[in-house]
Amino acid sequence: GESVGLHLPTLSVQEGDNSIINCAYSNSASDYFIWYKQESGKGPQFIIDIRSNMDKRQGQRVTVLLNKTVKHLSLQIAATQPGDSAVYFCAEMLRTGNQFYFGTGTSLTVIP
Amino acid sequence: NAGVMQNPRHLVRRRGQEARLRCSPMKGHSHVYWYRQLPEEGLKFMVYLQKENIIDESGMPKERFSAEFPKEGPSILRIQQVVRGDSAAYFCASSPTGGSPLHFGNGTRLTVT
């Protein structure tokens, strides 16, 4: 299977600080990437996506950066809030594929 | 606009019994995916279906597991003769087209005793 991994399994940040969650992928044929947020007892929730023809995309309080040279993806959350506490997954789809491969996840804890 | 609906939310089965997990995709979505999640792990792809067709089942165990998405009604993931190792959260996701973001349900947590 494909390898989509994360550098850190857990991350703790102070409320109001910015958070950066990283993700490495191994397949240069990956074409489409999504960040999901999963709260306890719930299914993953779409946060933001990016295609391989872009290197940056911004949403509300979130930014995704894609570095295809080193096969690295990051999610930046500005002014992190307690409600941001969750597990964050990156998912990738190959150019020729029809499914998303998920990483293990990073657990983000926001300290009030 | 209802999201992806999965039922039951929790399912307990004894070893050897059958488990049936149901998924109703979002309205207008004809692509359904099933994923399995073990505690503290990511989601593992199992199967991708469109109405009446299995498109990719490369993540499905060869035995005891099957999936369908009939013309009418929900998608069903069926696990026959369950074993303890089948205990996991099973998530269904849907999308309007292939290659578009997946919308997930809240999962069915299967416990095999």
Image (cartoon, coloured by chain):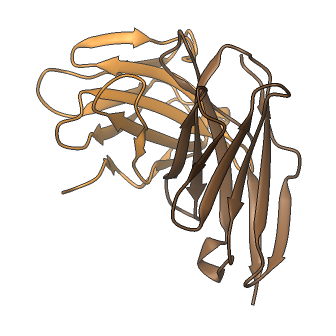
Chain colours: A brown, B orange
Depth order, front residue of B94/B91? B94
The residue lying at 15 percent from left, 32 percent from top is: B73
Q: Position of residue B12 (x, y in %)?
A: 49, 49
Q: Farthest residue in the bottom direction?
A: A112
Q: Where is residue B111 drawn, in percent x and y?
A: 56, 48
Instruction: Determine if residue B83 is in view.
Output: no
The residue closer to the viewer here, A40 or A22, is A22
In this picture, is A87 found above or below A54? below
Q: Tell me what residue is drawn at x 73 percent, y 44 percent.
A: B41
Question: Going 85% across and 53% down the picture, which residue do you hit?
Answer: A9
Q: Horizontally, is A60 left or right of B23 in the view?
A: right
Residue A107 locus on image (x, y percent)? 76, 60
Vertical placement of residue B48 versus B103, above or below: above
* Quadrant (top left/top right/bottom left/bottom right) for the N terminus of chain A: top right
- Judge left or right: residue B15 versus residue A25: left
Quarter of the C terminus of chain A within the rendering = bottom right
- State the count of labels: 0
The image quarter containing residue B29 is top left
**Which residue is rendered at x = 46% and y = 20% of the image?**
B47
Q: Nearer the viewer, residue A61 or B101?
A: A61
Does residue B31 appear in this view? yes
Q: Quadrant of residue A93 in the image? A: top right
Q: Is residue A7 left or right of residue A22?
A: right
Q: Is residue B18 above or below residue B87?
A: above
- Relative vertical location of residue A19 with respect to residue B107 in this rendering, above or below: below
